[in-house]
Amino acid sequence: MKKFKIKEFAQLLGYHPQYLRVLEKEGKIPPARRDPKTNWRYYTLQDLIEAKKQLGIPVNEKPTIQVFINYKGGTGKSTIASNYAYNLAQLGFEVLAIDLDPQGHLTRSLGIPDEASRTLPTIMDGITKGDISTSIISIKDNLLHLIPSNVNLTIFEKYLQQQSIAVETKLYKLLQPIMPKYNYIIIDCAPSVSLANINAMVAADDIIVPIIPDFLSYDGLNLLFKDISALRENATMYHARQIRIIVNKYDQRLSIADILIKTLKEEYKDMLLNSIIRQDATVERAQAKLLTIFEYAKRSKFAQDIISFTHEMLENEKKFTLNTVGAKND
Ligand SMILES: Nc1ncnc2c1ncn2[C@@H]1O[C@H](COP(=O)(O)OP(=O)(O)OP(=O)(O)O)[C@@H](O)[C@H]1O
Ligand SMILES: [Mg+2]
């Protein structure tokens, strides 16, 4: 069971840690628990849900679906998605990661070797059986859940091509029955223009675009954003509330990186996240050992940068939640 430290708990509620004591005295949040060994104060996920209810902050009944996509290859989609999913699960959220890429790199990044993933179900097996939950496996000592992928998933694209109506909403509809179980569904896409990726974007609440600071990546964004605009105009179920660009593999020694970031800031001001993920060879070593960065080197640059990214995403989430409260009160 995840134990939230006071600071984390305060952050998730959107308050200063000292204010928690005031809220506790006023009986507005459940009292902190104490670890019998260390005597430290902590809270559980249950306390978080209870506190949110008492404070009138809506508790998500639906998960937030976050899709990692870029038509360009090798920008860090799978690496960031897997470590972010793990980080969210460590914070106590119920997380389902979905590997939508027949290369299966998310699956591997989350600890499953290729030989093993070949015999595991993919999302396509769930479709064939008429029950998507049959494709979900528990991983990392039950910390999080995964719909794996392997080369067999190439038939997903063929399956979508054969659909005659509402082809772009298949994935979103398939996910509906399992949604109440999760706080977050994290989807990792293949670097392709495909129906599978259109489906992922239609299902998305947040579209997250990892980019490496070079001009080729920058050019590739246009095509993706053109497709997103077309979806916004034409796909009835498209509902993404934000598109966020995250710079990955940042190397401060390369002046091109700073020039690109400056250009991105000018052109995509509202989309660009403040967090930047630095180039760090530790991540490849972790992946070679089939470990997330938090299991392999939790003090590494990459781990620290994923934590910053997670915190920024949680801050954004809070804005949306608080907006909903505001809208209800108006
Ligand atoms: N911040 C980083 N520092 C160093 N290496 C990184 C970093 N992020 C990703 N990598 C490495 O870059 C390579 C590509 O990353 P990854 O597979 O996550 O990209 P991708 O966008 O998912 O690729 P694809 O488009 O093929 O799906 C991997 O070998 C990964 O270990
Ligand atoms: Mg990938």
Image (spheres, helix red, strand yellow):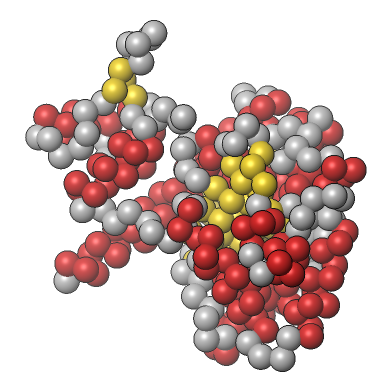
Spot occupied by residue 326 in the image (x, y as percentages of width and height): 23, 64
Spot occupied by residue 156 in the image (x, y as percentages of width and height): 79, 71
Spot occupied by residue 72 in the image (x, y as percentages of width and height): 79, 64
User: Is 319 placed above or below 33 here?
Assistant: below
Spot occupied by residue 25 in the image (x, y as percentages of width and height): 11, 29
Q: How many dots with numbers?
A: 0
What quarter of the picture does the C terminus occupy?
Answer: bottom left
Residue at the extreme front of the image, as rendered: 129
Q: Viewer-proximal residue, 131 or 153?
A: 131
Is residue 306 shown to the viewer in this render? no
Name the side, left or right, on which 287 lies relative to 24. right
User: Is 291 placed above or below 102 here?
Assistant: above
Name the side, left or right, on which 271 lies relative to 24. right
Q: In which quarter of the image is residue 115?
A: top right
- Which residue is at 60% across, 70% downward? 174
- Which residue is at 41% across, 27% downward? 3
Q: Viewer-proximal residue, 269 or 210?
A: 210
User: Is 79 placed above or below 327 here?
Assistant: above
- Which residue is at 46% across, 29% downward? 1
Q: In which quarter of the image is residue 252?
A: top right
Q: Viewer-proximal residue, 113 or 299?
A: 113
Is residue 44 shown to the viewer in this render? yes
Residue at the extreme left of the image, as rendered: 26
Name the side, left or right, on which 25 lies relative to 80. left
- Which residue is at 17% across, 67% downward? 329
Name the side, left or right, on which 167 lies relative to 24. right
